[in-house]
Image (cartoon, rainbow, N blue to C red):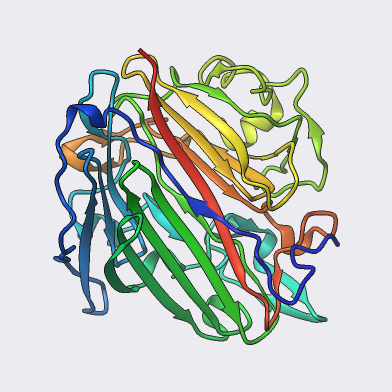
Amino acid sequence: MQKLIAKPILLAAAVVSIALVGCATHTCCCQGKIAGKPFGMDKAGVPVKLFTLRNKCGSEATISSYGGLVTSLKVADRNGQLGDVTLGYDNLDGYLKDTPYFGALIGRYGNRIARGHFTLDGQTYTLATNNGVNALHGGLKGFDKVVWNAKPFMSPAGQALELTYVSKDGEEGYPGTLTVKAVYTLTEDNALKLEFTATTDKDTVVNLTHHSYFNLAGKGDVLGHVVEIPADRYTPVDNTLIPTGELAPVEGTAFDFRRPTAIGARIGNDEAQLKYGNGYDHNWVLNKKIGDLTLMARVYEPTSGRVMEVLSTEPGLQFYSGNFLDGTITGKGGWNYKFRNGFCMEPQHYPDSPNQASFPSVVLKPGQVFHNVIEYRFSVKP
């Protein structure tokens, strides 16, 4: 198995960074104290707070101590008008229900693990099967459903929020006590950075990622968004969306986004892989070296002019086209989220890596540091 970590200290970094534009039309606003405001209580009665980071360009990122959720991200369109480009809820109650991970910090293992089990160091670990027969996004109570300790501060780069959480040995079936830190920073040069680090006291598996649903138009479906993904291969799946182990070429398939293509252009093609996911819900294998911060995707929305570039140090990108949104969820401002009203770009290690010896390893050992970097950069086309 290819090892994620080859040195006593792992620095396989991942930062979420979102560059924003249009700040010339805004005045300098805030370098002051970041105050958290009440956002209700979780199911156990633990108080939850919201923190809004702002910069001189007028951009805003609002983060909840519950689940590390990005509940709002306001960026400019081609006319300089700020708008929220993420799906979610107006209050905590929505997130406490059976939500599809809107804006969530995902862990301990993002994506699916086949049949809810894996073997590590000769011992088999059993996880909750919360996605059909498979385990998904950390289990019944993953990192998106816990209250994190939150500490706002002013960093040299801009307003920031540090979130910390200790996941105990055996939590959701995973081995080892995992100590996790996530730092969100809204920089004065218009970047939202989300940086994960984690350490363990016992061999474990880790795959942390971010799960915002984006709609760069701020309304309607996302089929007109134009996507480019510089990947020659992807990981085909079975009918439960678990990778078969093959790294298949995208050439000649609906998964070829090496040239800009609208999400809706081929999503209805008569291909078995599209039918398994009811659209796109697959992992692309990027043309890159693990650990290098490189472009993984570019998305352009013609009506608003917004462009989102996704960069990461991770080896894979899960592109999900909102196929399970079905109109049963009412979100921000009364928006009823229908089929494909949002999409996700989740840089991460490949799904089911703990059970796939040929995939890059997700094993973290004592004495090593997991440090994960993802970047979303926003700009506009005239």
In this picture, residue 3 sits left or right of residue 111: right
The N terminus: image quadrant = bottom right
Residue 236, relative to residue 255: is it above or below? Answer: below
Task: Determine which quarter of the picture holds residue 199.
Answer: bottom right
Q: Is residue 375 visible?
A: yes
Q: Is residue 281 visible?
A: no
Q: Residue at x 18, y 49 (%)?
A: 90
In this picture, residue 107 sits left or right of residue 56: right
Residue 42, relative to residue 214: is it above or below? Answer: below
Q: Residue at x 41, y 42 (%)?
A: 18
Task: Determine which quarter of the picture holds residue 178.
Answer: bottom right
Residue 228, relative to residue 326: is it above or below? Answer: above
In this picture, residue 255 sits left or right of residue 97: right
Q: Number of marks in the image?
A: 0
Could you tell me residue 188's position as x and y percent? 30, 46
Could you tell me residue 219's position as x and y percent? 28, 26
Could you tell me residue 374's position as x and y percent? 53, 49
The C terminus: image quadrant = top left
Residue 45, relative to residue 255: is it above or below? Answer: below
Task: Determine which quarter of the picture holds residue 207.
Answer: bottom right
Could you tell me residue 271's position as x and y percent? 69, 23
Q: Residue at x 35, y 28 (%)?
A: 216
Q: Residue at x 20, y 26 (%)?
A: 81
